[in-house]
Each structure stands twice: as structure tokens, then as C-alpha cells.
Image (cartoon, grey):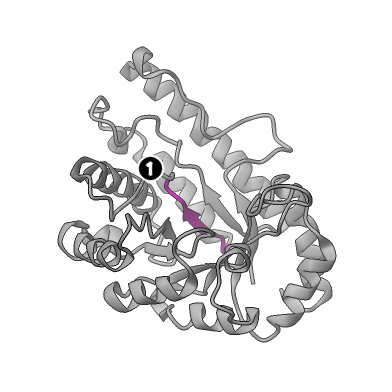
Amino acid sequence: MKIGYPCINESLDCTSSRTFRLASYSEDRLITTVEQNLACLRRILEYNVAHGLLFFRLTSGLVPFASHAINTYNWQEHFQMTFRRLGEYIRNNNMRISMHPDQFVVLNSPNEQTVRNSIAELVYQGSILDLMGLDSTAKLQIHGGGAYGDKTSALNRFAEVYHTMLPEAVKARLCVENDDRTYSLQDCLVLHEMTGMPIIFDNFHHECLGNGEPMAEAVEMAASTWQAKDGLLMMDYSSQAPGERKGKHVQHIEKELFHDFLTVTEGLDMDLMLEIKDKEASALQALEIARALGRM
């Protein structure tokens, strides 16, 4: 098991997602910003390795406006060596990497422009992992999208876009995650049957929108969709913030809940991404609990 957190390290004085306004776009500004983002990413990765946090989700914002028509600069060639060195560091330290495109990536949208924009974003993010030289265990995770009043048609539309419009390099990395409002684990299993995509399982979303499957059974069902080329099941872990709206993530890890989750899933292998607001602070505590239970 590897444990990690997404995108931002709150212990460091830098961010890997610096950006600027579209109206201020220039190639010089783009180059400077990407240099700063990649330098910060290196620091985050080094922190994670030093602290035993070997699962990390890269921010979508490493290259500002990368999938926007305004950005015609060949940043891939410009930063080729930097990405290669980051990838070497990741591989040499046995880290697992993922990316999670923003909510505007919706492959089953009835709007053709939204679909085209979504594919462009997936191509950009997949190219980051390709430039790093990471294999197909480094994944892109998205949600099923909307139901648009007819979930069956929406599922079919997703599958059609997947098979007819996505490049093979994207399909090799793409996973679907159950969400807390529309697409349950069972819906994602349907998408898996239609496309072959592995399912990234989110325990908290399953608690919000499930079909009565016990947690260990649900984890097993998701894990069964992963092949050797995909690596271990990736999971998102979180819990409900007390006193907040249903579905709001907790600020800090609930140690007893996490302990119980690991106990219930004993014997099931997974890499855990903690979607908890205080990032590496909770991830470090999760690491201690997992080690104490012999899960690492």
C-alpha cells in the first residue's frame, strides 16, 4: 500500500499550480510560470519521499492554459528534459502518480464543444505523464459526468466518445471514479463493461451514493476491474465533515474511522489517496496507522 494526498503541500512555501490571467498570456510568462511550477513539484516530491508518502496526484495546473487554443507554444519540447528528470526521480523512488482533470471534463456532455475541450484537457494531462516516462500505472481519473435526464443514454454516449474519439495514449491511462450524486459504483461497473476502464473507488462517495454493498465487497468489486498493466487499485479516501452538508470532506483525518476502514479491508491491496483538506498532515497520520496495522 502507498498513501498520499493531492496536489498541494501545505508545509512548503511554494505551489506547483501558479498561473496568470488569460488576458496577460505571453510565451515568456508561460515559460517562467512553468519553470516555477516544476521546481516546486520537485520539492514536493522530495518531501514526500523523505516522509514515506509515495502516492501523489499532480495538479492540473502545471502548465497554464495548456489545453486552451491560445497556447501554441511547444512547451513539451522546451521542458522535455525537466519532465524526464522528474519521471526518473519518481521511478527511482517507487512512487505512484495520478492526475484528476477538473469538473469541466465531461465526456458524455451533449455539447460537442464541451466534449472536444474535455478531450484536449485529457490529452494535455496524459502528455505530462508520457513526458515523465511513466508507465500505464500512472492514471488519469474522471467522473462519469451528467445523467441529463437519461442515464442509459448518457452511459452510451460516454462509451461512444471513449471508443471513437479518445487517443490510445489517453485510454491507456483513463479511469472512472464513482461520485456522490450521479454515478454509483454499479454505474461505473457498467462503464467498465462498456469500455474496459478500471474503476477508482471512493469510499466517501460510496457512503453518499451506494447500492447497499458493504465496504469490503465494494472495494473488491472495484479492484476486480484493474489488470496487471494498471497496477494496484487506486482509491480515494475521506469522510464526512461534522455539521456540514452531505458530501463535504473532513478537515482532518478521523483516526478511528481510518483504522476501522483498514481493518474492514484487511487482505485487500490498494494505493490510497487521502482527499482530506489538511493534505500531508493527515497523510502522515494515516501512514502511522497503516504501519501499526502492518498494511504498508
Residue in view at x 19 percent, y 66 percent: 163
Mark 1 element type: loop
Is 169 situated left or right of 269 in this image? left
Residue in view at x 32 percent, y 16 percent: 26
Reply above or below: 187 against 3: below
Is 20 situated left or right of 52 in this image? left
Q: Quadrant of the C terminus?
A: bottom right
Which residue is identified by label 1?
104
Residue 99 in magenta stretch = yes
Q: Residue furthest front?
A: 149
The foreground one among 234 and 185 is 185
Residue 259 in magenta stretch = no
Snapshot quadrant of residue 161: bottom left
- Horizontal and vertical percent position of residue 235: 57, 67
The foreground one among 183 and 88 is 183
Q: Quadrant of the N terminus?
A: bottom right
- Horizontal and vertical percent position of residue 144: 38, 60
Q: Residues within 10 Å of mark 1 (few under 14, many from 20)?
A: few
- Horizontal and vertical percent position of residue 195: 28, 72
Is 193 situated left or right of 84 in this image? left
- Residue type, label 1: Phe
Residue stretch in magenta: 94-101
Residue in view at x 45 percent, y 41 percent: 60
Q: Residue furthest top?
A: 24
Snapshot quadrant of residue 142: bottom left
